[in-house]
Image (spheres, rainbow, N blue to C red):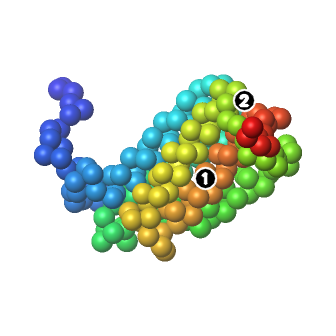
């Protein structure tokens, strides 16, 4: 039996196929948004690999990365096809946003948050989480055009960036803060 090839050549004209059909330019709002989410997920994969399999951080990141598949499915769907999406499977829900808030609140109890600006890079895992946070913020900005309200994509990404900041500080333990620039 012949193995199916990974390449299709369908995108050679600068377009990409979407979930539930349709094609758009690779530089349009939808691929720009889900592409940024894909970058964030890849960076979180680096943080996960660095944290070690089976750790508390690994478990949290796997949960988040699965949510990001849901988010990318929504962002990869034309607005006129979004009625076909399933809550929590291919469309972000308010409950998914609330779960992130619960994670943030739980983590806040594990360390004393810094009261000043944080200098990233206390350790490799925290630095990777901070990079993930900045890419998530970019994904949030792109998602404004790709999935406007009432979509929960932007609220999810907003909370996720807050969670990634919190995870980075938790991984640092005692954060290095900046009090003034001399």
Q: Residue at x 44, y 64 (%)?
A: 144
The label on residue 160 is 1
Q: Residue at x 62, y 40 (%)?
A: 130
Residue 179 seen in this snapshot: yes
Residue 66 seen in this snapshot: no
| Residue 45 rendering spot, x and y as whole percentages | 54, 33
Say above or below: 105 vs 10. below
Q: Quadrant of the C terminus?
A: top right
Q: Nearer the viewer, residue 55 or 165?
A: 165
Q: Secondary structure at mark 2?
A: loop
Task: Using the numbered discs, state the Cα–Cα distance from disc 2 to disc 1 in whole angstroms.
Answer: 21 Å
| Residue 104 rendering spot, x and y as whole percentages | 73, 53
Cβ–Cβ below 8 Å for labels 2 and 1? Answer: no
Say above or below: 127 vs 36. above
Q: Is 134 left, or right, of 101 in this rendering? A: left
Mark 2 / mark 1, whichever is N-terminal:
2
Q: Residues within 10 Å of mark 2 (few under 14, many from 20)?
A: some
Say above or below: 117 vs 97. above
Q: Is 98 left, or right, of 133 in this rendering? A: right
Q: Residues within 10 Å of mark 1 (few under 14, many from 20)?
A: many
| Residue 67 rendering spot, x and y as whole percentages | 54, 51
Quarter of the image holding residue 65? Answer: top right
Quarter of the image holding residue 90? Answer: bottom left
The label on residue 122 is 2
Q: Secondary structure at mark 1?
A: helix
Q: Residue at x 43, y 47 (%)?
A: 36
| Residue 1 rendering spot, x and y as whole percentages | 18, 26
């Amino acid at each position: 039996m012949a193995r199916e090839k990974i390449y299709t050549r369908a995108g050679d004209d600068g377009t990409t196929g979407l979930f539930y059909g349709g094609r758009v330019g690779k530089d349009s709002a939808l691929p720009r948004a889900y592409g940024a989410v894909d970058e964030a997920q890849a960076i979180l994969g680096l943080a996960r690999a660095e944290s070690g399999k089976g750790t508390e951080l690994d478990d949290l990141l796997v949960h988040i990365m699965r949510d990001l598949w849901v988010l990318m499915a929504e962002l990869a769907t034309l607005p006129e096809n979004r009625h076909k999406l399933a809550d929590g499977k291919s469309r972000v829900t308010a409950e998914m946003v609330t779960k992130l808030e619960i994670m943030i609140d739980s983590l806040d109890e594990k360390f004393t948050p810094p009261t000043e600006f944080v200098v990233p890079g206390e350790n490799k895992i925290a630095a990777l989480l901070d990079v993930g946070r900045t890419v998530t913020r970019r994904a949030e900005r792109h998602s404004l055009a790709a999935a406007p309200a009432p979509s929960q994509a932007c609220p999810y990404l907003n909370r996720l960036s807050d969670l990634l900041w919190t995870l980075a500080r938790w991984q640092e333990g005692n954060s290095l803060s900046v009090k003034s620039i001399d």
